């Protein structure tokens, strides 16, 4: 949990888009031509696209993959910027971004007004009306 929050402090976003049900996620995928990358919430190429489905993960804590519209998505359960239990790792690009962001913070006395301009992040405002329309951004907690 602390590592996750520190990840946000260092400019990392969530790796997932959140859906209440699998059918919601499938509809979102259908609306985006079944492109698996539509679930790539942080824009980093080495984190897996993650359709976080609330009703799956609240009741099935050992789910390792989910199939949507015939596409199998491996669940990145160990990534610190996910919402799963037992998170322990970051991808190389997440580490690179965190290091870059730490340098930026150090140049600004360790304070920044916001993380919103962190590179490689998709801004929540695009989720409501852009190519990610229909996804439910999760607040950065
Ligand atoms: Zn968070």
Image (tube, rainbow, N blue to C red):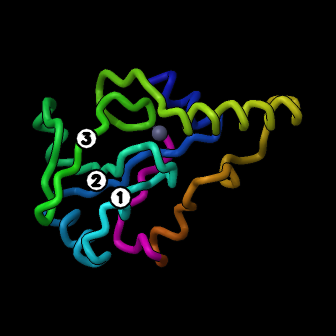
Name the image quarter holding the N terminus: top left
Looking at the rendered structure, the secondary structure element under dot 3 is loop
- Residue at figure coordinates x 35%, y 36% from the top left: 83
Tell me: 124 left or right of 98: left
Residue hosting label 1: 39
Task: Examine the image and state in which quarter residue 128 appears.
Answer: bottom left
Of pointers 3 and 1, the one earlier in the residue sequence = 1
Of pointers 2 and 1, the one earlier in the residue sequence = 1
**Could you classify mark 3 by the number of other residues whose Cα lies within 10 Å: few (under 14), some (14-19), or many (20 or more)?**
some
Residue hosting label 2: 51
Q: Main secondary structure of the magenta part?
A: loop
- Residue at figure coordinates x 42%, y 58% from the top left: 137
Q: Which mark is residue 81?
A: none
Where is residue 39? Give x, y as percent.
35, 58
Where is residue 49? Give x, y as percent.
35, 51
Q: CA distance from mark 3 to mark 2?
A: 8 Å
Q: Which mark is residue 75?
A: 3
Looking at the rendered structure, the secondary structure element under dot 1 is helix
**Could you classify mark 2 by the number of other residues whose Cα lies within 10 Å: few (under 14), some (14-19), or many (20 or more)?**
many
- Residue at figure coordinates x 19%, y 40% from the top left: 57
**Could you classify mark 1 by the number of other residues whose Cα lies within 10 Å: few (under 14), some (14-19), or many (20 or more)?**
many
Q: CA distance from mark 2 to mark 1?
A: 6 Å
Looking at the rendered structure, the secondary structure element under dot 2 is strand
Task: Examine the image and state in which quarter residue 85 appears.
Answer: top left
User: Do tag 2 and tag 1 residues touch (Cβ < 8 Å)?
Assistant: yes
Please state the extent of the stretch shown in magenta in the rendering. Answer: 131-141
């Amino acid at each position: 949990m602390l590592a996750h929050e520190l990840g946000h402090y260092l400019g990392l976003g969530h790796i997932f888009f959140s859906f209440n049900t699998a059918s919601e996620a499938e509809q979102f995928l259908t609306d985006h031509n079944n492109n698996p990358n539509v679930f790539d919430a942080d824009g980093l190429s080495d984190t897996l696209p993650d359709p976080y489905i609330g009703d799956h993960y609240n009741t099935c804590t050992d789910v390792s993959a989910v199939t949507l519209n015939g596409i199998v998505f491996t669940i990145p359960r160990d990534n610190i910027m996910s919402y799963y239990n037992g998170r322990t790792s970051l991808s190389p690009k997440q580490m690179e971004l965190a290091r870059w962001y730490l340098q930026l913070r150090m140049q600004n006395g360790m304070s920044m007004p916001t993380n919103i301009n962190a590179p490689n992040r998709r801004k929540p405002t695009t989720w409501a009306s852009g190519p990610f329309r229909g996804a439910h951004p999760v607040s950065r907690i």
